[in-house]
Image (spheres, rainbow, N blue to C red):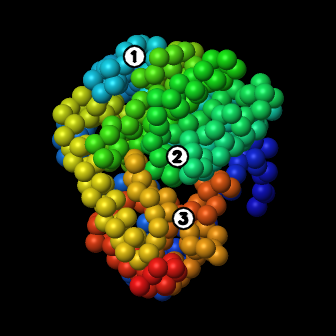
């Protein structure tokens, strides 16, 4: 059989680090049926029932059996604008400042193809969500990592960026509440980013995937709440985490009209928007009473307590995440993130995600998801405790 070579663009794509992890986990699972997987980021709860019911009704609507409008139904964009007004008191023009995405993963890859030329520089958080890298690679652009360090609350230190880097930079990705560190943004951080974007013509992309998930009674701030945000950037919003709709593939990009136009242009060539029934159910989710979301966040907060208490009990000196559904724990002395993750997989049958998979500054940490019940999180900590890895272990 002929083997056709992949395009140069495809060959530039980074290795999928987590595919390797999945293979390791499968091997252990073949021999043991009690593996606890805390390594992934898939919400464990079903979509809220009223949203599913809305889709069922909408599926009968023959209008939705036809091609939808290329850029999505106006009612969905209006629902996004209403959501921003209600949740953040931000005014958004649904006609020019919202694009519908088949999940934000798609938008995060597309935006690099929309705005970058080969050789441009992109500022990316490190550790960070690996999908940012994919679009950058396809565009033939260069990544410049912005280290997220614990001593800086996992915010980038923009003063470390040289004039040359800032001159060549065209795009910057930020993500708060942050995957993988669980850190949250401040007004000051976003203001600094906006000033930088304005001064150096850098488009700021704020990935707000975990926007609904903030702990200790603190609602995470939207980038668009900060004056001047729309002038320099966009925010990506997804229904995947807020409403447990990861499988539905619905997201949005909201903000600067020139960026929205570019995203809609590329999408005119790739897709024909989403099934109308999904769009109707998505609009329903955004517009309806959000008490299910509050309950979901409370559930993650209880799990956070179970995990952090369990960790402290075994002598693991950890900090609780402020948002997202991930905890970012340091590995014990003498280990690297991968050797520690391999050890707890083999000896405790607990899967954690090695921090280095999120970038070189993720070394020294592992990411643990709050996507299992409290008792499972507790058991995972007990099993890791039995390995006696921490100086104050019982
Ligand atoms: C930080 C971050 N951004 C974006 C996404 C993509 O979300 P979706 O494509 O489901 O909208 C994820 C998913 O895990 C994520 O963790």
Q: Secondary structure at mark 2?
A: loop
Q: Is residue 242 visible?
A: yes
Q: Position of residue 93 (x, y in %)?
A: 40, 13
Q: Would residue 183 be found to the left or right of residue 74 on screen?
A: right
Q: Would residue 24 be found to the left or right of residue 236 on screen?
A: right
Please tell me whether mark 1 or mark 3 is closer to you in this view.
3
Bin the neighbour count of mark 2 within 10 Å (Cα to Cα): few under 14, some 14-19, many 20 and up: few
Report the residue at 41% width, 85% height from top.
394
Mark 1 to mark 3: distance in Å?
Answer: 40 Å
Residue nearer the viewer, 361 or 280: 361
Which residue has dot 1 on it?
92
Q: Position of residue 32 (x, y in %)?
A: 44, 85
Q: Earlier in the sequence, mark 2 or mark 3?
A: 2
Q: Would residue 268 be found to the left or right of residue 91 on screen?
A: right
Q: Earlier in the sequence, mark 1 or mark 3?
A: 1
Which residue has dot 3 on it?
330
Q: Would residue 67 be found to the left or right of residue 363 on screen?
A: left
Check whether the beta carbons of the residues at disc 1 and disc 2 lie within 8 A of each other. Answer: no
Q: Is residue 260 visible?
A: no
Height in image: 278 above or below 376? Answer: above
Check whether the beta carbons of the residues at disc 1 and disc 3 lie within 8 A of each other. Answer: no
Residue nearer the viewer, 267 or 393: 393
Residue 273, labelled with which disc?
Answer: none
Height in image: 23 above or below 204? Answer: below
Q: Quadrant of residue 61?
A: top left
Which residue has dot 2 on it?
153
Mark 1 to mark 2: distance in Å?
Answer: 30 Å
């Amino acid at each position: 059989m002929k083997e056709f070579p992949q395009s140069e663009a495809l060959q530039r794509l980074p290795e999928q680090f987590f595919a390797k992890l999945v293979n390791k986990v499968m091997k252990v699972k073949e021999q043991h049926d009690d593996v606890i997987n805390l390594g992934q980021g898939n919400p464990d709860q079903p979509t809220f029932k009223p949203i599913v019911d809305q889709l069922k009704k909408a599926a009968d609507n023959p209008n939705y059996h036809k091609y939808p409008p290329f850029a999505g139904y106006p009612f969905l964009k209006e629902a996004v604008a209403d959501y921003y007004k209600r949740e953040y008191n931000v005014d958004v023009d649904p006609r020019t400042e919202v694009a519908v995405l088949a999940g934000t993963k798609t938008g995060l890859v597309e935006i690099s193809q929309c705005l970058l030329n080969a050789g441009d520089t992109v500022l990316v958080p490190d550790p960070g969500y690996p999908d940012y890298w994919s679009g950058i690679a396809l565009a033939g652009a260069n990544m410049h990592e912005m280290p997220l360090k614990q001593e800086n609350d996992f915010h980038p230190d923009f003063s470390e960026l040289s004039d040359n880097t800032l001159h060549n930079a065209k795009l910057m990705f930020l993500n708060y509440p942050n995957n993988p560190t669980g850190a949250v943004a401040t007004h000051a951080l976003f203001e600094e980013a906006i000033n930088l974007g304005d001064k150096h013509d850098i488009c700021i992309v704020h990935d707000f995937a975990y926007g609904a998930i903030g702990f200790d009674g603190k609602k995470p701030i939207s980038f668009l709440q900060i004056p001047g945000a729309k002038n320099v950037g966009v925010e990506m919003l997804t229904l995947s985490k807020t409403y447990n709709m990861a499988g539905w593939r619905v997201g949005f990009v909201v903000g600067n009209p020139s960026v929205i136009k570019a995203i809609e242009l590329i999408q005119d060539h790739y897709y024909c928007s989403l099934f109308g029934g999904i769009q109707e159910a998505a609009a329903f989710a955004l517009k309806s009473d959000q008490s299910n979301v509050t309950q979901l966040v409370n559930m993650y907060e209880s799990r956070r307590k179970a995990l952090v208490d369990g960790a402290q009990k075994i002598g693991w000196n950890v900090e609780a995440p402020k948002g997202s559904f991930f905890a970012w724990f340091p590995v014990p002395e003498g280990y690297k993130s991968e050797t520690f993750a391999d050890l707890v997989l083999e000896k405790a049958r607990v899967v954690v995600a090695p921090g280095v998979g999120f970038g070189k500054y993720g070394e020294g940490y592992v990411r643990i998801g709050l996507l299992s019940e409290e008792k499972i999180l507790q058991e995972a900590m007990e099993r890791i405790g039995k390995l006696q890895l921490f100086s104050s272990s019982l």
